[in-house]
Image: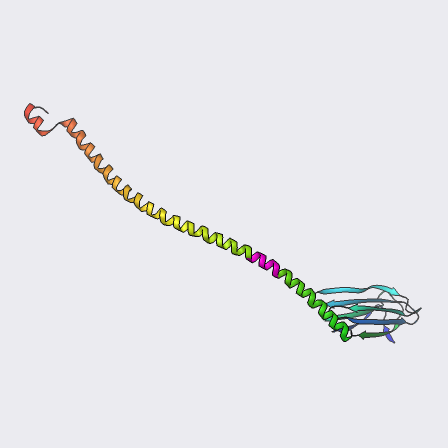
Amino acid sequence: NVPVAVRSKLQFPIHVTAPGSIVEYKVESKGYDIGFSIIAEREEGITVVKESERIEAHVAAVKGKFLVGSVPCRLKFTFDNEYSWMREKQVSYRLSITPPSAEVLLAGRRRRAKACRKATEEDLKSARQRLESASSQKTNIESEIAKLEKLIIEQKKSLEVVAKEETWLKTRVDLRVKQQELLDRRLQNGWADEIGENGTT
């Protein structure tokens, strides 16, 4: 018998390392009921195996069993007497953990391997489809880049031709502007030989 003091809890953890283990328990109390719960703690979180409730283990033994699927797992059994202000409780419990047989372990291992094989096969199919699409896009982009590079080379050549023509035309425009200015002065002021013959400006 284990005492559970007034306004307190008694907890004890059990570690399970073999997947597929069967856990069986039997709880009894003397004279009065007791709060009882079971939780399973794993890396991914906490699972409630048995909700906390007051059990009449003083009337009849409370029994149960459950399967532990994933490991490592820590089972936490809790006897709760926090609701009692007057009475200490006496509880007794029996716990057994039965690991799976070699056949069950092998079957579970093969089942997990098949599930993993299926998942990898689906992922491989998806990856191959994406690879084919990515390769096609890469080829198209490379083709577009080659076209653009060829166009840039051609445009550079055209730019050189236009730049040369622009330089020549600027020179020509400057020359024609100067010629027009000279002709305008001649037309306005006349030529030197005209002044000598007429005696006028």
For the residue pair 71 and 47, the one nearer the viewer reads as 71
Of the 4 image quadrants, the one containing the N terminus is: bottom right
Residue 32 % position (x, y) = 91, 68
Residue in view at x 46 percent, y 54 percent: 142
Task: Determine which quarter of the picture holds residue 93.
Answer: bottom right
Residue 86 % position (x, y) = 89, 68
Task: Determine which quarter of the picture holds residue 183.
Answer: top left
The span shown in magenta is 124-131
Is residue 175 among the parts visible in the rendering?
yes
Is residue 8 among the parts visible in the rendering?
no
Task: Determine which quarter of the picture holds residue 30.
Answer: bottom right
Colour mapping: rainbow
For the residue pair 34 and 60, the one nearer the viewer reads as 60
Residue 192 lies in the magenta stretch: no
For the residue pair 133 and 26, the one nearer the viewer reads as 133
Residue 139 % position (x, y) = 49, 54
The answer to whether residue 4 is above or below residue 139 is below
Residue 118 % position (x, y) = 67, 63
Of the 4 image quadrants, the one containing the C terminus is: top left
Name the chief secondary structure element in magenta.
Answer: helix
Residue 127 lies in the magenta stretch: yes
Instruction: Report the side of 148 relative to 117 (left or right).
Output: left
